[in-house]
Image: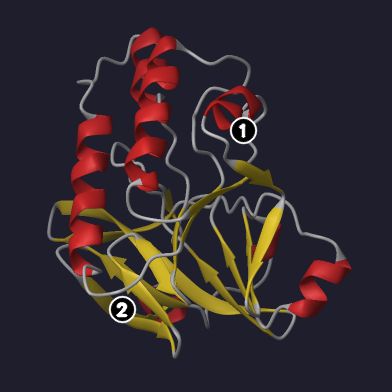
């Protein structure tokens, strides 16, 4: 499904101009939870690999020149755990088998990503332009020069999701958001992390400065077995 005329939603990813964009992978998240006494199975990495396989299968007839990870490849702020080393390098190797270039947009969790990127000769940037599309993590607003060149902005960071209630049952689903920021098209990607659904945009505190505005006219696209157009957020409220 298209979110803009030249940008496709492919499961949790975006595809345009031979570029594939995913956001907020947070490798190592389950290890952090286990350390806190929240016991979860260590299946996150395998589930993400399967999800990537699904995405690559959906794009098998399309060329992928570049894969962009839009921030927070790993979860831990101050250290690189053994699991993060192993799984992050394996994740990058998997991506490298499907493209010519990998670009890491630095997220707020990526404080010491350098050693991992250096091992695989992967570039780390604050933001990146693909045509007239600016990809930035979303935890802060880029400088005026970067914004000036863009007609569309893609961010992560927020991990948007939406809770739907039917009778006593409530389920939370990852979603894309599409709206405007200073006259430009703004797309907010869901987290690629399979363990946590994300921020319920109907009730949780909004994190990104890009979204410090009335969001009622933002359009919601829920990701489940396929992508569903749920209309405007104001109607869902």
Q: Which mark is residue 39?
A: none
Image quadrant where one finds the N terminus: bottom left
| Above or below: residue 99 compared with residue 237 | above
In front: mark 2 or mark 1?
A: 1
Which residue is the site of mark 1? Answer: 110
Residue 88 in the figure: left or right of residue 180: left
Q: Residues within 10 Å of mark 2 (few under 14, many from 20)?
A: few
Q: Regarding mark 2 in the picture, which secondary structure is present there?
A: strand
Colouring rule applied to residues: secondary structure
Q: Is residue 106 at all visible to an observer of this figure?
A: no
Who's the residue at 25% across and 60% down the image?
A: 55
| Picture residue at 31% right of the left edge, 78% below the top | 230
Relative to 93, 121 lies left or right: right
- Residue 230 image label: 2
Q: Position of residue 220 (x, y in %)?
A: 39, 74
* CA–CA distance in space, label 2 to label 1: 32 Å
């Amino acid at each position: 499904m298209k979110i803009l005329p030249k940008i496709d939603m492919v499961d949790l990813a975006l595809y345009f101009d031979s570029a594939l964009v995913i956001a907020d992978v947070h490798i190592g998240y389950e290890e952090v939870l286990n350390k806190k006494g929240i016991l979860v199975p260590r299946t996150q990495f395998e589930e993400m690999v399967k999800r990537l396989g699904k995405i690559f299968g959906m794009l098998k007839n399309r060329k992928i020149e570049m894969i962009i990870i839009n921030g927070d490849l790993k979860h831990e702020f101050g250290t690189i755990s053994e699991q993060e080393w192993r799984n992050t390098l394996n994740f990058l190797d998997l991506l490298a088998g499907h493209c010519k270039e990998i670009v890491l947009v630095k997220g707020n969790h990526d404080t010491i990503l350098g050693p991992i990127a250096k091992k695989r000769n992967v570039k780390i940037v604050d933001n990146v332009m693909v045509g007239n599309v600016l990809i930035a993590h979303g935890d802060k607003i880029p400088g005026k020069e970067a914004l000036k060149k863009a007609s569309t902005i893609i961010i992560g960071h927020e991990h948007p999701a939406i809770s739907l209630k039917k009778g006593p049952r409530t389920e939370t689903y990852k979603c894309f958001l599409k709206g405007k920021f200073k006259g430009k098209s703004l797309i907010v990607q869901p987290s690629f992390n399979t363990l946590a659904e994300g921020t319920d945009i109907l009730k949780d505190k909004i994190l990104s400065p890009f979204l410090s505005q009335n969001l009622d006219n933002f359009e919601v696209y829920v990701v489940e077995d396929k992508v569903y157009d749920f209309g405007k957020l104001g109607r869902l409220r």
